Amino acid sequence: MNIGIGIRSIRTERGITQHELAEMCELSPTSVSQIENGIKRPSSRNLTKICEVLEVPEPLIYILAMQHTDVPDNRQNAYQLFYPSVRDMLMQMLGVKMAG
């Protein structure tokens, strides 16, 4: 699970730079970079701040953070079949396009 993937996707679609997000969340730009690159996980408090700034519910970040390696082998087929559609639907509801 890489929470940074979801944060980066939403941040860039919202037209916010890492530096701007850091300022709005009272974090260092280095911290935001490390979070987005999966080097460190945000604290609960910082994740709440990030979600408030990005105007997204926190569970969405967790859904977007999900990766195929988080799913047991016996559930990979269902993941591959459903996850892209679920992700895209949620992003459309929020008016955010996913990269890649």
Image: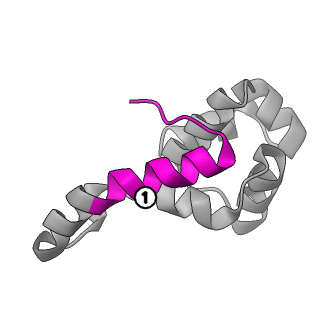
How many marks overall?
A: 1
Prevailing SS of the magenta stretch = helix
Mark 1 sits on what residue?
86
Residue 42, image x and y in percent? 64, 56
| Residue at 78% across, 64% down | 45
In which image quadrant can residue 73 be found? bottom left
| Residue at 80% across, 42% down | 27
Q: Is residue 16 left or right of residue 70?
A: right
Q: Residue furthest left?
A: 74
Q: Is residue 26 left or right of residue 47?
A: right
Please tell me which residue lies in front, 15 or 40: 15
Residue 76 makes an appearance in the image = yes
Magenta segment boundaries in residue numbering: 82-100
| Residue at 30% across, 65% down | 70
Q: Amino acid at mark 1?
A: Val
Residue 1 makes an appearance in the image = no
Q: Does residue 40 lie above or below 1 as drawn? A: above
Please tell me which residue lies in front, 86 or 11: 86
Q: Does residue 47 lie above or below 23 as drawn? A: below
